[in-house]
Image: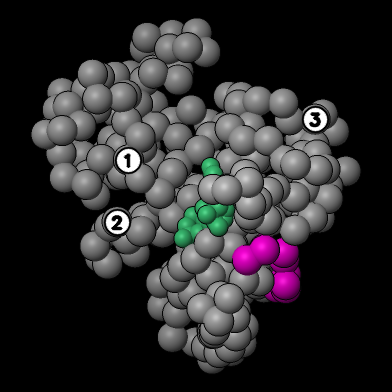
Amino acid sequence: MNQLSIQAVSRSFAGPGGKSTQALLPVDFEVGENDFVTILGPSGCGKSTMLRIVAGLDFPSTGQVLLDGRAVTGPGADRGMVFQSYTLFPWLDVEQNIRFGLREKGVTAALQKERCDYFIAKVGLRGFENHYPKQLSGGMQQRVAIARALANDPKILLMDEPFGALDNQTRVLMQELLLGIWEAERKTVLFVTHDIDEAIFMASRVAVFSARPGRIKSDIPVNLPHPRHYTVKTTPAFMEFKARLTEEIRAEAIAAVAH
Ligand SMILES: Nc1ncnc2c1ncn2[C@@H]1O[C@H](COP(=O)(O)OP(=O)(O)OP(=O)(O)O)[C@@H](O)[C@H]1O
Ligand SMILES: [Mg+2]
């Protein structure tokens, strides 16, 4: 059985003047346990909408999402979400933000501290434990959000352009961090990005969305060997994936602009 099953999920939104916008056409998509699926597609094609539906933060107009065979009806600790924009609790410091979910789950204070310290070090924020979000740069806030999601140890990580605001060097380090965690712990990940290199580097599968109304246009397995080192990005096999995906995305980007 697949861990996550997206069954004929569509979404339309009511718009101004009673006109509705079809954000997603019915999408069928199966995600197996330990899959690392990256999602590429033009702006406005419904990627965030689909992720929010899987997270239980929004509801489909038709269809349903099953997680381990049970219908998703709302958010849950089994799914960890990292958004495009920063979503820390402004009234909590870095450490309290990261420990929040663990505390809610009733994890002991000692274990909260241990996991928190581990991920603070991993995302390079040692020394900032007691800073509040407004005292951090955008990229630092995003790293806290990533540490918080990882510390909670959810079954599925739902990540919506989580590295979009980071500088290129930090971004590559975060890709390696996330991939290393995936290689060690084999989490299930759905990861939206606009960056083709990033999509290939981390994925076991790349799903390409069509222009709005979105549907999944292709679903490409990435069989590059693990552990993957950033040097894989210069190999012929990587370049082949990149050339193919660049063509696919280009066609959809043109269709999106011509809309
Ligand atoms: N809450 C909402 N109310 C009305 N329309 C919405 C809402 N959320 C999304 N939409 C519409 O749904 C469509 C898809 O939006 P979505 O945010 O899912 O796109 P996306 O693929 O994530 O784009 P991007 O790459 O720019 O983040 C857009 O046309 C958008 O205007
Ligand atoms: Mg989006």
- What residue did someone put label 2 on? 165
Circles 2 and 3, Cβ within 8 Å, touching? The answer is: no
- What residue did someone put label 1 on? 86
Measured from the top left, where is residue 26 in percent x and y? Answer: 79, 55
Residue behind label 1 places its C-beta within 8 angstroms of ligand 2: no
Near-viewer residue (71 or 259)? 259
Circles 1 and 2, Cβ within 8 Å, touching? The answer is: yes
**Residue that lies at the very extreme toward the front in this rendered image:** 17
The three-letter code of the residue at mark 3 reads Ala
Residue at 39% across, 18% down? 100
* Pointer 1 or 2: first along the chain: 1
Q: Is residue 93 magenta?
A: no
The three-letter code of the residue at mark 1 reads Tyr
Residue at 52% across, 13% down? 105
The magenta region covers 212-220
- State whether residue 25 is above or below residue 146: below
Question: For mark 3, does the 10 Å Cα neighbourhood hold few (<14), some (14 to 19), or many (20 or more) residues?
Answer: some
Query: What SS does tag 3 mark?
Result: strand
The three-letter code of the residue at mark 2 reads Ala
Q: Quadrant of the N terminus?
A: top right
Measured from the top left, where is residue 222 in percent x and y? Answer: 65, 72
Structural distance between the alpha carbons of marks 1 and 2: 10 Å
Question: For mark 2, does the 10 Å Cα neighbourhood hold few (<14), some (14 to 19), or many (20 or more) residues?
Answer: some
* Pointer 2 or 3: first along the chain: 3
